[in-house]
Image (tube, rainbow, N blue to C red):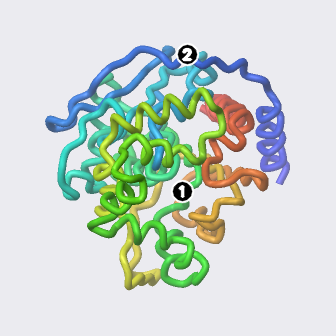
Amino acid sequence: MFKLLGILFLITLACGVQTGLSAELGEDGYADSDGVKIHYVTAGEGPLVVLIHGFPDYRYSSREKIPALATTHQVVAVDLRGYNLSDQPEGVENYDMKKLVADIDAVVRHLKRDKAIIVGHDWGGMIAWTYAMTFPDKTDKLIILNLPHPKGLTRELANNPDQQKNSQYARDFQDPDAVDKMLKRAGGNKAAVARGLTFWVKDKDAREKYVEAFTRSDFEGMLNFYKANYPREPYSYSEESTQFPPVKCPVLMFHGLKDTALLPGALNDTWNWLEQDLTLVTIPEAGHFVQQDAADKVTRCMVGWLKMQRGDE
């Protein structure tokens, strides 16, 4: 009990430390993932941290985290395939989760590292979970932002009517004509669709960067993440048949409780699917884009948790 209270006290202190954030992101680079170029920016030196964005987003989502983490780590923020400056292969099959995980592994290998701290939000979170299960020896630590463990999400889709209802957007994205419908609503104007996808970006200057990045992106590729990987109806779940390899590293999870896309019920039992400690930070005032809604708190807690983990080593 006293050890647990001590850990919570350290996290509380860490979440109160100011970090001194900067908008500078780092140096550009590209990794080759079986012929697909994956763009990234990197800054700092030390243990490797890989930051993976979700939908609709790109590497700029990590702008607050990079300078804070780069004081003690080499930080890499990627553009996922289909997005911004990374390659945009055609075909749903090219967005299968195995290929998305291979992209992250290509970045780790390109930087000549044996292991990394993997950080992911939304689809980046799903990639991060899957990377940790696929490459347990390469995953030093795992940080997840608003993406429940895939077993929890599968259970909620099968059993929770509210989650089924709130996942209608994902089923709409799986429609073969989803992009055509988006363009039709925007009068065929790709830039208008790109601007519409920035609905969650509150900073006006950042929003313009997002519009530029999304205009460079491939909408089909962006929605192929859903077509290739999001569970489809009829949803089913059982403890026996829904199995995933255990996650073997320490895990830090953030979840904005106002998230309407991924409800917090899916967080239940996460600890049963891990072999090491779980630190769960729920943020009542934040929504799905917790890295924006509580940017400073998320960054400070992340820095503090990594510092605490280093102290345990």
Instruction: In this rendered view, identify the residue nearer to me: 255 or 307.
Output: 255
Q: Residues within 10 Å of mark 1 (few under 14, many from 20)?
A: many
Q: In this picture, is 236 found above or below 44? A: below
Q: Choose the circle earlier in sequence order: 2 or 1.
A: 2
Instruction: In this rendered view, identify the residue nearer to me: 1 or 249.
Output: 249
Mark 2 secondary-structure assignment: loop
Identity of the residue drawn at 46% across and 64% down: 150
Q: What amino acid type is highlighted by mark number 2?
A: Glu
Mark 1 secondary-structure assignment: loop
Question: Residue pushed farthest front?
Answer: 187
**Label 2 close to label 1 by CB (< 8 Å):** no
- Does any portion of residue 246 appear in the rendered image? yes
Quarter of the picture containing the C terminus is top right
- Does any portion of residue 108 appear in the rendered image? no
Quarter of the rendering containing residue 58 = top left
Q: Residues within 10 Å of mark 2 (few under 14, many from 20)?
A: few
Q: Position of residue 78 (x, y in %)?
A: 40, 32
Q: What amino acid type is highlighted by mark number 1?
A: Leu
Identity of the residue drawn at 55% across and 61% down: 148
Identity of the residue drawn at 45% across and 60% down: 246
Quarter of the rendering containing residue 160 = bottom right
Q: Which residue is mark 1?
A: 147
Q: In this picture, is 290 found above or below 78? A: below
Give the alpha-carbon distance from disc 2 to disc 1, as whole Å: 27 Å
Q: Which residue is mark 2?
A: 24
Say which of marks 2 and 1 sits in front.
Answer: 2
Question: Residue pushed farthest left?
Answer: 35
State left or right for residue 83 relative to residue 6.
left
Identity of the residue drawn at 40% across and 50% down: 127
Q: Position of residue 310 (x, y in %)?
A: 62, 29
Q: Position of residue 24 (x, y in %)?
A: 55, 16
